Amino acid sequence: MSANPAIGGRPKFWVAGDWNALFGFGTNILVNVLVLTGLLRFVLKMPEQLVFGRILPALGLMLCLSTGYYAFLAWNLARRTGRTDVCALPSGISVPHMFVVTFVVMLPIKLATNDPMQAWEAGLTWVFIQSFVLMAGGFIGPYIRKITPRAALLGSLAGISITFISMSPAAQVFSTPVIGLVCFAVILANWFGGARYFGGVPGGLVAIAVGTLIAWGSTAIGLDYGDLTLAKLGASVSNFGFSVPLPAWHHTFDGFKYLGVILVTAIPFGIYDLIEALDNVESAAAAGDSFPTTRVLTADGVISLIGCLMGNPFINAVYIGHPGWKAMGGRIGYSAMTGIIVLVLTWFGIIAVISALIPVVAILPILLYIGMLIGSQAFQESPHRHAPAIVLALLPQLAAWGKTQIDNALGAASTTAAAVGSAKLAQVGVLYDGLATLGGGATLAGIILGAITVYIIDRAFEKAAAFAMAGTILTFFGFIHGAEGIGINRSPTVAISYFGVAAILFYLARYAEFHPAALDLHEVAAEAD
């Protein structure tokens, strides 16, 4: 750990490593902005004036506020501790929610009404409700984090990193290997291997430049990499202009007429955001930077609320990946500068030009790198004996990802799992019902299963029983292991099963005898000290 001579000195806003983190994190944000722009334009068929004139400027404002605030938290931590290695929490659009609000909330309303404005208003209301869930959760989050083992929190997070963060970029990298693998090698050599390029030019920038050159060079000789054409690039310039976000609170409240549809997903996904933010704060603490949990969670809610009241239907979230940006040298400035750059790109309509110029596959290897780093952190930052708990905590995310792949494949064939039948799927080894049950509320389910296992390993059977009872309650009300959303008695069989686990563990806590070789008690005592 590096430290300033005097505690309370003025930390540096920018260091050399911030360049690497800026291009890495900045391109991560850019990919997400490009994806959501495509969802708005080509899935929801929203008019370009609404997308580039209202939604993206409000999104840019939200991201600038978010990255600026977390840069301030890092600056304040560095000033108080005198450390020079503090790295700001990354933040941006919540990627899972980006698809949920598009396909589960806005698209059905767009198809039912044929009115993109009403779909937009429903999205704003969805974020409005989630914002208050996050703000309320900010006050209970520290207690959840205090009683939950690190292996459970990081294990569930690793499940997200392996599935929803890494698998799609990895598949796209290998679908277009001439660009993807080359760019991936450039990034790995720089960020893992320490290789320097051209006098210290950031590896992320080199990878994007190399990928773009390969893509346009291939296009010039008649190959198709990323559907890049000069005609589309020229047409993208028409979106240049200056647009500032305008108040949209009347649109937000107009969306309350769809409250019944919205509540089904807004509350459980608000809780998902709360748990994921706790995971990411714990991940940052494991990397050496402890931020105040309440201030982080409530800030997510407040910033998302401001964004939706200005016209942005996508929620803000603390991102997975803090250890990755810190490992490549990021400190404070990378976060704030990312927000400023995104503000410029969205307020001046430059996003359309970038999407027509840079192939997405040149950017995706950066997400794959982050997924690798976070997946490995769960094992590196937890006691070795907790490794089985981490593996168990991964499984709900793997199940959720697998179910998503099955649903998408069947949807492409214009059918569903219900139409095909679970029995027929089971005959070919596709255990759809089991995946749906295991993957329901995957983030929270992973934490519960991981915590139970950690406390069993540590012989803290009463604590394990308490988490099993929490699993009973969460399952009964549909927060985990349920496919129908929150409610009452959603998965009674699973709830009863958790109750049985709790009863057994409580009995063992009172009456069981244990083999002394089953656990290295000296290791436990040393870690407690």
Image: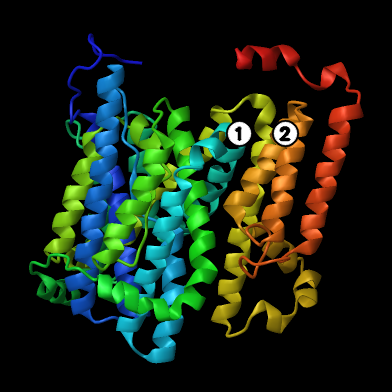
The amino acid on which the numbered mark 2 sits, given as a three-letter code, is Lys
C-alpha separation, residue under disc 2 versus residue under disc 1: 9 Å
- Pointer 1 local density, CA inside 10 Å: few below 14, some 14–19, many at least 20: few
Q: Residue furthest left?
A: 241
Task: Identify which residue is drawn at 91% across, 28% down.
Answer: 511
- Residue 84's x, y, as percent? 27, 21
Task: Identify which residue is drawn at 38% across, 41% down.
Answer: 296
Above-or-below relation of 485 to 70: below
- Of helix, strand and loop, which one carries label 2? helix
Q: Earlier in the sequence, mark 2 or mark 1?
A: 1
- Residue 298's x, y, as percent? 38, 46
Residue position for label 2: 463
The amino acid on which the numbered mark 1 sits, given as a three-letter code, is Ile
Q: Quadrant of residue 230?
A: bottom left
Q: Is residue 330 visible?
A: no
- Of helix, strand and loop, which one carries label 1? helix
Q: Are marks 2 and 1 in contact (CB under 8 Å)?
A: yes
Quadrant assignment for the C terminus: top right
- Pointer 2 local density, CA inside 10 Å: few below 14, some 14–19, many at least 20: many
- Residue 71's x, y, as percent? 26, 37
Quadrant assignment for the N terminus: top left
Q: Quadrant of residue 424?
A: bottom right
